[in-house]
Image: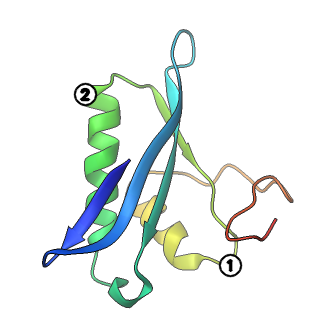
Amino acid sequence: MFLIEVDGHLAGRMALGGIVRGAFQSAGVGHALDQALTGRAIATIALHLLVRHAFEGLNLHRLQAETQPTNLASGRVLTRCGFEHYGSAAQYVRINGVW
């Protein structure tokens, strides 16, 4: 997990988890940012750094991320960082208590 600090204060986190080596060389990405700090490209910059570390530092081949369909800001961050929408999976993951 990587913490995001802005002006000396904890602003959010980025996580790289579920790393699978061997034939897959993949991992999952999670991110969260203080809602008061959205719209300032903080999450986008942090995720770009995490993606670069995953591909260049850890030599991964693929990353994936899940987000709630209503969380448009999170979707935009993922798109800006090169993620593509592959589809929807109803009740696949529980985020903030919502399936």
Which amino acid type corresponds to the residue marked 2 in the rendered image? Gly
Given the current orientation, which residue lies at the most extreme front position? 9
**Secondary-structure class at tag 1:** loop
From the image, which quarter does the C terminus lie in?
bottom right
Residue at the disc numbered 1? 70
Dot 2 surroundings within 10 Å: few (below 14), some, or many (20 or more)?
A: few
What residue type is disc 1 on?
Thr
Q: On the rendered structure, is 34 left or right of 90?
A: left
Real-space CA distance between mark 1 and mark 2, rounded to the nearest whole angstrom: 32 Å
The x and y percentages for residue 67 are 63, 63
x and y percent of residue 20 in the render? 55, 22
Q: Name the colour scheme.
A: rainbow
Name the residue: 29% across, 53% down: 48
| Left/right of residue 57 with respect to residue 74 in the rendered view | left
**Disc 1 or 2, which lies upstream in sequence?**
2
Q: Which residue is mark 2?
A: 57
Residue found 51% across the figure and 15% down from its top:
21
Work out whether 63 lies above or below 49. Answer: above
Q: Is residue 64 above or below residue 98?
A: above
Quadrant position of residue 72: bottom right
Task: Tell me if 2 is positioned left or right of 66 in this view.
Answer: left
Crowd around label 1: few <14 · some 14–19 · many ≥20 (10 Å): few
Nearer-the-camera pick, 55 or 15: 15
On screen, residue 18 versus residue 57, left or right, reads right
**Residue furthest toward the right?**
90
Q: Position of residue 12 (x, y in %)?
A: 36, 68
* Vertical comparison of 39 with 50: above or below: below
Residue name at image x 34 percent, y 56 percent: 47
